[in-house]
Amino acid sequence: MQIATPLANAKIVIRPFEPGDADEFVRAAHESIETVGTWMSWCTPSFNRDKALGWFATCDQDRAAGRAFDMGIFCATTGQLLGGASINQLSPHHRYGNIGYWVRQSRQGQGIARQEVALLRDFGFRQLGLFRLEIVTGVGNRASEAVAIAAGATFECLARNRIFLHDQPLDAHIYALVPAD
C-alpha cells in the first residue's frame, strides 16, 4: 500500500526508509543505546548496516502488504534521520493498530515523538480507516508515557506480561486514541 501524501509538518517528515538512510540509522541507533536500547531490543552495539537494510526491506514488504507502516522520522529542514515511527500490529477486522516510535538520543525531549504521534494518528484514522490506535509502553518507560499523554492518548489499563523485552515478559501501560479524541 502506498502512502497517499507525505506525512509532514513544519518540523518533521515521516517517510519510508531508503537504502541511503542505512548509515545514519546505524549512527542514530548507536548513539541511543542507553535510552532507546532499554526499551527496544534491536538497539545494541551489534546493530549494523546489514541489519538496517534488512529492516528496511521488511518495512517495504509489510507496507506493500498493508500489514504495518514502519518508517523513518526526518528533520523537515535538514533531512537528518531523527528516529522511527510506525503503525503496526494492525487488525483489519477490528480496525485498530499500534503506534510505535523512537527518537535518537541527541534529539530526545524536543517534541519529535509527540509530533510523530499526531501525524500517524491522522494517517491511521483518515487514510487507513482505523477506529483505534494504541500506544503500549513498558512499565517504567516514563518518556514514552509522557509522549502518549502529550499526544492526547487516554490511559486505559495496566496489562500484565503485555510485551516481551530482553528475553523477559514485561507489564505495560495501554494508552489509546480514537477519532473522537
Image (cartoon, grey):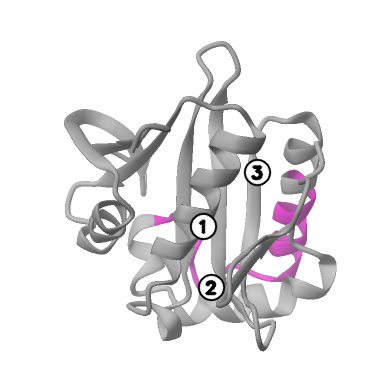
Q: Nearer the viewer, residue 80 or 121?
A: 121
- The circle drawn on residue 119 is none
Q: Nearer the viewer, residue 20 or 86?
A: 86
Magenta-drawn stretch contains 115: no
Q: Regarding mark 3 in the picture, which secondary structure is present there?
A: strand
- Amino acid tagged 1: Trp
- Amino acid tagged 3: Phe
Label 1 near label 2: C-beta < 8 Å? yes
- The circle drawn on residue 42 is 1
Range covered by the magenta-colored residues: 40-58
Question: Residue shown at 70%/63% (left/top)?
Answer: 52
Q: Residue furthest top?
A: 93
Q: CA distance from mark 2 to mark 3?
A: 19 Å
Magenta-drawn stretch contains 41: yes
Query: What x and y, as percent, mark residue 172?
Result: 24, 39
- Amino acid tagged 2: Ala
**Number of numbered discs present?**
3
The quarter in which the N terminus is drawn is: top right
In the image, is 93 to the left or to the right of 5? left
Residue with the mark numbered 3:
69
Residue count near mark 1 (Cα–Cα under 10 Å), binned few <14, some 14–19, many ≥20: some
The first of marks 2 and 3 along the sequence is 2
The first of marks 2 and 1 along the sequence is 2
Query: What x and y, as percent, mark residue 25?
Result: 64, 73
Question: Residue shown at 82%/74% (left/top)?
Answer: 20
Question: Residue shown at 27%/59% (left/top)?
Answer: 150
Work out whether 153 lies above or below 145.
above
Residue with the mark numbered 2:
29
